[in-house]
Image (spheres, rainbow, N blue to C red):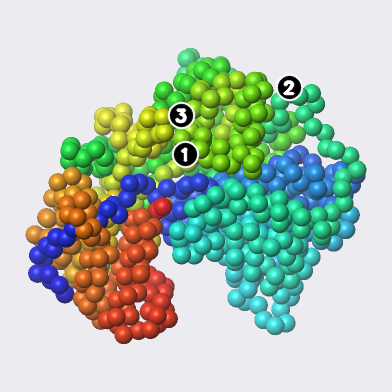
Amino acid sequence: MADGNGSTSIHNGDDAASSMTPFIVASGVATVVLGAASLFVLNKVNRKREDDVVGEEDECEASEKKPLDHTQYPNGYLNIFFGSQTGTAQEFGKELQSEAAEYGFMPRLIDLEDVPMGDEGETESFVKFLSAGLEDAVGGERAKSVFLVATYGEGEATDNARMFVEHLKGLYSSRDENSSVNSFLEFLDFSVFGLGNTEYEHFNAMGKLFNNLLPKFGAHRVAELGLGNDEDDIEGDFQSWKDEKFWPAIKKQYFAPPAKTPSGNGHTNALPKCKYDVEYIEKVNGKISRPDIVDQEDINSFTRHYFTSIDCPVKVVRELRNESDEGSTVHIEIDISDDIGKRVFNYMTADNLAVLPVNKDSDVRKVAGALGYNLDDVFRLKPSPKNEKQFKHIFPTPCSIRECLERYCDLTMVPRRSELKSLAQYAQDPMDKKALLRMASKEGKKEYNEKIVDAHLGLVDILTSYCKSIRMPLEHFIDICPRLLPRYYTISSSSSVHPNSVHITVAVLEKSRLDGSAYRGVCSSHLASIVPSGKSTCRVFCRDSTFRLPEDSSNPIIMIGPGTGIAPMRALLQERSYQRNTLKKKVGDSILYFGCKNRNQDYIYADELESFIKEGTLSSLYLAFSREKKDKVYVQHLLKENAENTWKLINDENASVYVCGGTKMGQDVVQTLKGIFRDIGKKSEDEAHSYLKKLEEQKRLVQELWS
């Protein structure tokens, strides 16, 4: 191998050192490359009874067996299934739900996690679930359903859809020509809208899977497949599909208009319907009561981490960049040594740490002031009348309004156009209402992009600076405001070397807005601002990573991690050092490609890498500094320069390849590897592609990327 004696090769450049450290779950689709179910699901949620229906309106509770009003809903029930990692598919489902009555349907919004699938190979439970209420519908022999499904990571199902997908795949793989499975969904009419991102290779894999797999069981497709692209305008894609494909196809297939208009809000100043209610409670001896104990099955699947994550002490917050660099990357160490930490954090080297952000106190105060809330008031969140059956807890209560706004409400994320439409209902000033509705419309897309997206305005800005007339009760704000999502960071420590602490490497996000003010990442800025002390904590949980060292430690590894992509590589090197020096195992070569702007500014963990070289754990280190010379050289260019040795390591010595960083860098590295397989391995284009896919199947090519 090149530089096999541990010498260091230095080249110019890799600006691919990402500006965003976390594996952000952004803009409604999962743009994180993660491989396994999260550890925060401590116990699998019990499936709902088969006669229960998961809906948002009280009329759709099949368990109550209320007869359907055929004058209002002549087309029966419309099942709206969603598989979502961040809640975007669910929000799209709510839009369909709000429009369904106009087309003569009673909507039922259903989390795929709540669909009873039964035992392996069984179909009866799902059929019974779909059939609930069909006897009440005109033409009720058909179950009308739409599936809104996001693709997570490298073509995977979201957490809440995983069991459903695995069950369907199992049914398909076990069927034969005479199997009844081939027609068990022959009574199902379906449509599919997929949520994905073209930056990833397996664009909308789940949407395509549902669209292709359901007909294999006899289901009938009504509307053509819709594919949303979060890299561009996923909300616009959904709106176009909904208005131009889905509803027209539904109308053509079996549309009967309702004989009467569903009851509205009454007079124009009436509040919209809300599925929540708030019970204000008094403090006991000046203290807030402990949160209510809630059964797992009564917790919303998207916010379960609010109940199961834990507060851990933050022991170290250390700047990694030189003070001459305007940017910031911090090294953080979190103590998990106490009993609950050990039980929850049975983490493995290079797993993923989810951090629950906390909004700035100034933003919390602004929102409370704008809406007239007392931050010290304590409340319990309850279902509104007639919504008891479908109510699920979204965060622990009782809690103060301050905690609610700090921990559970996303005050800074750019709102979707549908959320602007919802906000407009609460604007007291007609001009504010008109502006919000205009930007929420298709015609106002350009204005929305210019004034909201490009300016990076969040709810806090809209409420306090642009539409000051908005007023709403707390329960309505909780219903409208998006939840504050966890941010994911690849753990940069070895669990063998640091069993009592977990380390993360965080790039602090700060960008300039159009008006000159600064937009700061809510999570990274929160973490960077922590001053370690006995009371300094952050709320976290752990989930599996796809990064795993070879079972045979003598096999070589190739690591490619520019910028904060070095995080899992640091963890892997710590583990290899432990295997070599403590366990006295034979450890193969470890090769690292790292890139950043300048060796004197953002060459993070430089001292540690040099130490790994000196002790023999790190065999070769290839560096790329993009701002030191005119010609930029990135990590993929250095990889290409070492093409022959790379081919030998992978093909002859069974090396594993690990890639972490931005999606563009990951794509360039994959193309470089394919080129090496062609040029050095003498393979055709198709053979090179197949060879790479085989490495992925063998878990010898692992990527964790973010956009």
First in residue order: circle 2 vs circle 1? 2
Query: Which residue is rendered at x = 91% and y = 43% of the image?
Result: 259
Q: Is residue 289 left or right of residue 653?
A: right
First in residue order: circle 1 vs circle 3? 3
Question: How many residues crowd around disc 1 within 10 Å: few (fewer than 14), some, or many (20 or more)?
Answer: few
**Placement of 426 over or under 553, stated as above or below:** above
Question: How many residues crowd around disc 3 within 10 Å: few (fewer than 14), some, or many (20 or more)?
Answer: many
SS category of the residue bearing label 1: loop
| Residue 406 - label | 3
SS category of the residue bearing label 3: helix
Position in image of residue 370 (x %, y %): 53, 19
Position in image of residue 75 (x %, y %): 84, 52
Q: Is residue 293 left or right of residue 454?
A: right
| Residue 412 - label | none
Q: What amino acid is found at the position of numbered circle 2 in the picture?
A: Asn
Contact? badges 3 and 2 (CB < 8 Å): no
Q: Is residue 628 left or right of residue 53?
A: left
Question: Rounded to the nearest whole Å, what is the CA distance between mark 2 and mark 1?
Answer: 32 Å
Question: Rounded to the nearest whole Å, what is the CA distance between mark 3 and mark 2?
Answer: 30 Å
Position in image of residue 388 (x %, y %): 70, 36
Q: Is residue 73 left or right of residue 607?
A: right
Contact? badges 1 and 3 (CB < 8 Å): no
Query: Label 2, on which residue?
Result: 269
Q: Residue 589 sits in which quadrant?
A: bottom left
Query: Which residue is rendered at x = 80% and y = 44% of the image?
Result: 102
Query: Label 1, on which residue?
Result: 454
First in residue order: circle 3 vs circle 2? 2
Q: What amino acid is found at the position of numbered circle 3 in the picture?
A: Glu
